[in-house]
Image (cartoon, rainbow, N blue to C red):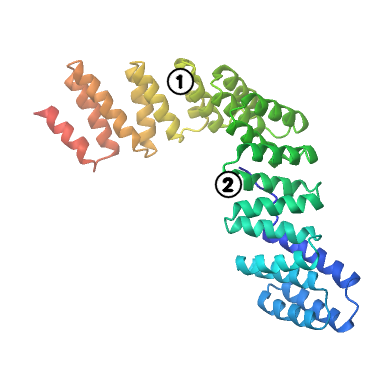
């Protein structure tokens, strides 16, 4: 769903590489010449000159630099140039040289496998890394994403539950875990999770909107409308939210109330033509012809082509009532807004004959 902490994003890669370069430069390299080469390579990395940095890392290795550090930093450079198979090979070297104990190389290797769509390999490598670093919430989060790609819903939930246990404040994890629960059709767990998160983060109004969506999936339309209304108390002019509320009210067989909500949205934002079409269709179904006409005309003023079908439907209903003059009036009104539409012109000619 949402993934704000991508371990192999550019920002995170740079953070990781500079941390570990610094560590190895200060603590692991005894040879002054290799230190100087590493400093130069690090500077090149900072400048985005990755191929040149790789050359210096290799020279540093030949002059006694720690092979774990060199392999890891080389892998980061290769990743930055999107040479993912080569990056994977470099990270594997770092893992081998460290006897499987250097967790950053494992995490990055798992991320590269993910990029290469080698999801089973990515999952296995994340598990190895998390054995070494079990409190890495991001690692559990990305493991959950890898499980998602394989269709393993239970594996996804277990990984994301672990991430949530480590960092229950992270909104990203809350959303992803709730999505995992929804995939298992365990709506109550998703609802409980999001409610708790909203209690901890009352400024995150989107939690209420999300709750409305989850209740709607559960077919609890009254509770869905209630969640949307709760959000509207805080964001009363949110026309998209008003549209959602109207939509769920229709699903709950409350069409007239939905029309009131759509009218409210259009008062706030007259150019919201999708709301005008929605309102027009509801009014049409209720045989409220003048209200439907007003709504379709409002949509037409804002160039929503769906209004053409609205006017045509009004004309058709009028013709069924044997009121050809009214049908003609609807079509001519549509033609005012769409003078080049040949289908409207043809229907007008048929009525005139």
Q: Of helix, strand and loop, which one carries label 2?
A: helix
Query: Of all residues shown, which one is farthest toward the left?
Result: 353
Q: Residue at x 83, y 77 (%)?
A: 65
Q: Which residue is mark 2?
A: 149
**Residue 9's x, y, as percent?**
67, 58
Q: Residue at x 17, y 32 (%)?
A: 347
Q: Please state, as top left, top right, bottom left or bottom right, where the N terminus lies in the image.
A: top right
Q: Which residue is mark 1?
A: 259
Q: Please state, as top left, top right, bottom left or bottom right, where the C terminus lies in the image.
A: top left
| 210 or 83: nearer the viewer | 83
The reply to whether residue 234 is visible in this rendering is no
Q: Residue at x 67, y 37 (%)?
A: 157
Marks 2 and 1, the one that precedes in the sequence: 2
**Residue 248's x, y, as percent?**
51, 23
Q: Is residue 109 left or right of residue 65?
A: left
Question: Where on the picture, by quarter, is residue 188?
Answer: top right
Kindly check if marks 2 and 1 are in contact, taking CB atoms under 8 A apart as contact.
Answer: no
Q: Is residue 89 left or right of residue 31?
A: left
Q: Is residue 145 above or below residue 315?
A: below
**Residue 56's x, y, as percent?**
74, 80
The reply to whether residue 328 is visible in this rendering is yes
């Amino acid at each position: 769903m949402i993934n704000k902490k991508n371990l192999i994003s550019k920002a995170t890669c740079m953070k990781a590489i500079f941390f570990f370069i610094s560590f190895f430069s200060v603590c692991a390299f005894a040879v002054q010449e290799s230190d100087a080469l590493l400093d130069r390579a690090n500077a090149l990395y900072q400048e985005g000159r990755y191929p040149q940095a790789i050359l210096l890392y290799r020279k540093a290795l030949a002059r006694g630099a720690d092979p774990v550090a060199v392999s890891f930093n080389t892998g980061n450079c290769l990743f930055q140039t999107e040479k993912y198979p080569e990056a994977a090979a470099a990270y594997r070297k770092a893992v081998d040289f460290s006897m499987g104990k250097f967790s950053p190389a494992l995490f990055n290797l798992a991320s590269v496998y993910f990029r290469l769509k080698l999801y089973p390999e990515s999952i296995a490598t994340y598990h190895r890394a998390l054995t070494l670093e079990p409190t890495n919430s991001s690692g559990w989060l990305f493991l959950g994403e890898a499980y998602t790609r394989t269709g393993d819903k239970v594996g996804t939930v277990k990984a994301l539950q672990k991430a949530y246990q480590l960092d229950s404040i992270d909104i990203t994890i809350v959303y992803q875990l709730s999505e995992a629960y929804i995939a298992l059709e365990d709506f109550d767990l998703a609802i409980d999770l999001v409610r708790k998160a909203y209690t901890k983060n009352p400024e995150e109004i989107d939690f209420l909107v999300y709750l409305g969506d989850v209740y709607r999936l559960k077919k609890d339309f009254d509770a869905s409308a209630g969640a949307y209304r709760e959000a509207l108390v805080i964001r009363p002019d949110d026309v998209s939210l008003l549209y959602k509320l109207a939509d769920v009210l229709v699903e709950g067989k409350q069409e007239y109330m939905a029309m009131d909500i759509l009218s409210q949205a259009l008062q706030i934002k007259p150019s919201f033509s999708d709301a005008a079409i929605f309102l027009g269709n509801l009014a049409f179904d209720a045989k409220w012809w003048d209200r439907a006409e007003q709504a379709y005309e409002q949509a037409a003023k804002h160039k929503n082509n769906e209004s053409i079908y609205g006017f045509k439907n009004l004309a058709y209903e009028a013709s069924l009532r044997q009121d050809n003059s009214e049908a003609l009036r609807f079509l001519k009104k549509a033609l005012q807004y769409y003078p080049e539409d040949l289908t409207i012109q043809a229907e007008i000619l048929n009525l005139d004959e």
